[in-house]
Amino acid sequence: MVSNTQDPQKKLANAKDLFDYQDRPLPAERLIVEAIDAFKKRNDDMGLAEAYRVYGFFFQSEAVERWGHVYRRQGFLDKSATFDGRITKALEYFEGARGLYSDHHAYDRLTNVDLNMGFTFERHHLISEACKAYDHALRDYQNNARENPSARQTPPSGFSSLPEFLEAQKKRVKCYSQNSVN
């Protein structure tokens, strides 16, 4: 059951739950599109950026993969998206979020978007692009630390800091044999 709410932030939370845990991507996409429309009407760039980020996660979710037979037949609510092109569409939405977060100097959120773009590129064997995304994540992390010295970002388990984690990611995917930006 999906609770009815007019709050676009709650719509995004509900959508994420639907595609991450309930294997219900169809109603999830409807909620994401409704949230995008609401944020646009409010001229809420930060909300819109979050909606774009969630839409990026949606397009690369396992739920969408499992429901491929439906999406191949009827398509997505975003008519420019196709099932076979959904990863490119996920990256487009991440890039849209990235642009809005950058405009507002939301470096903590930029770090997250860049990191997830890196993961996406890596999963699809686009190593050079993954390395660049990891470099951007590090730069955004450093900008956030400089502008918000009291901010604390929790590193992934097993790492003492996000820079240490990013360095390990870059070594693992062999960024140093690529033309990575520093």
Image: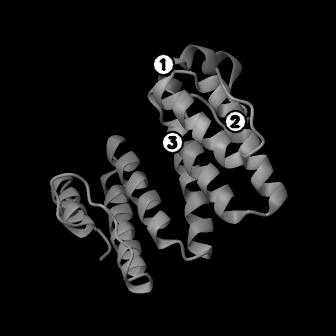
Classify mark 2: helix, strand or loop: helix
Residue mark closest to the camera, 2 vs 1: 2
Which residue carries the number 1 mark? 66
Query: What's the residue at 45%, 68% (across, down)?
Result: 108
Residue 74 in the image: state x and y as whole percent.
Answer: 70, 19
Identified by mark 1, the residue type is: Arg
Query: What's the residue at 38%, 49% (across, down)?
Result: 121
Residue mark closest to the camera, 3 vs 2: 2
Q: Is residue 160 above or below residue 67?
A: below
**Closer to the N terminus: mark 3 or mark 1?**
3
Residue 47 in the image: state x and y as whole percent.
Answer: 66, 57
**Closer to the N terminus: mark 3 or mark 2?**
2
**Closer to the N terminus: mark 2 or mark 1?**
2
Classify mark 3: helix, strand or loop: helix
Query: What's the residue at 51%, 21% (across, down)?
Result: 23
Classed neighbour count for the residue bearing mark 1: other residues with Cα under 10 Å, few (<14), some (14–19), many (≥20): few
Identified by mark 2, the residue type is: Leu
Which residue carries the number 2 mark? 31
Residue 80 in the image: state x and y as whole percent.
Answer: 70, 39
In the rendered structure, the answer to whether residue 37 lies left or right of residue 182 reads: right
In the picture as drawn, the residue positioned furthest to the right comes out as 41
Which residue carries the number 3 mark? 57
Foreground pick, 1 / 129: 1
Q: Which mark is residue 42?
A: none
Classify mark 1: helix, strand or loop: helix
Identified by mark 3, the residue type is: Phe
